[in-house]
Amino acid sequence: MAQMYADEAHEGAGEGEDAPSGWPDLPGDTAFTIKVPEADPLVRAGFPAHVTVLYPFVHESRIDAATDRELTTLFAGHDAFTLTFDSFRRYPGVLYLDPWPHDPVTALTKDLTRRWPEAVPYRGIFGAGLAPHLTVANSEGPATQDAAYDALQAELEPRLPLSCRVQAINLIIWDGARWRDRAAYRLMGCQDPC
């Protein structure tokens, strides 16, 4: 996801461009994310704060009424949970917040990939995938990232910790120009109209 909901080292690509790692977002690509509006004021990466559950999922054309029912059942089998963000970490070129605990997010990813094994996290570029994370910034290269991210981290650390109650998982779709919401799937115990 190189644009609005992107979140790995490939995020430096511009709107509609292939990412530096060589994979493009293709029209009809789908993904599951956790929206984290509480973190939006901290994000400098040009897209809303989120934690990716699975990117990519299956092509949009494969999501029919039966798939939608199956997804509704799968997500309803997982309890709502709270993520806490209290520390920064880094991948090459990326400053991110580490959501804790990881287990509820990784359990969702495992259930999705068990049922849809063709949905390989990050197209297999990162092996088994990446640990759950919330990208804060991704615009610095190797020569500038340490100083820039040290300064940004020092600026933002006083705003931590922050917590987010996760009651739904969002299905988003790349339409060729931007990521857009398609559906929100409630988790067990969801109190709000998710």
Image: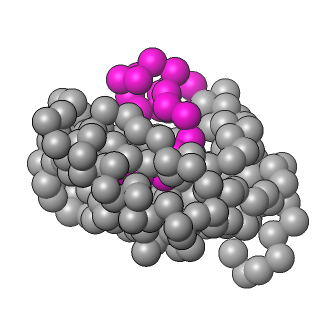
Res. 145 image quadrant: top left
User: Which residues, given as a range, are shown in magenta?
Assistant: 116-137
> Is 129 colored magenta in this rendering?
yes
Q: How is the image coloured?
A: one colour
Q: Residue at the location (58% across, 64% down)? A: 160
Q: Is residue 89 visible?
A: yes
Q: Residue at the location (54% across, 70% down)? A: 159
Judge from the rendering whether residue 65 lies leftward or rightward of residue 30; answer left or right.
right
Judge from the rendering whether residue 166 lies leftward or rightward of residue 59; answer left or right.
right
User: Residue 57, image x and y in percent?
Assistant: 48, 41
Is residue 87 depicted above or below 20 in this figure?
Answer: below
Is residue 7 depicted above or below 9 in this figure?
Answer: below
- Residue at the bottom extreme of this rendering: 193
Q: Is residue 112 visible?
A: no
Res. 125 image quadrant: top left
- Residue at the right extreme of this rendering: 189
Who is closer to the viewer here, 148 or 169?
148
Q: Residue at the location (83% across, 76% down)? A: 191
Quadrant placement of the C terminus: bottom right
Judge from the rendering whether residue 2 lies leftward or rightward of residue 29; answer left or right.
left
User: Residue 3, image x and y in percent?
Assistant: 26, 56
> Is 162 colored magenta in this rendering?
no
- Residue at the top extreme of this rendering: 127
Who is closer to the viewer here, 3 or 173?
3
Q: What secondary structure characterizes most of the magenta part? A: loop
User: Residue 11, image x and y in percent?
Assistant: 26, 47
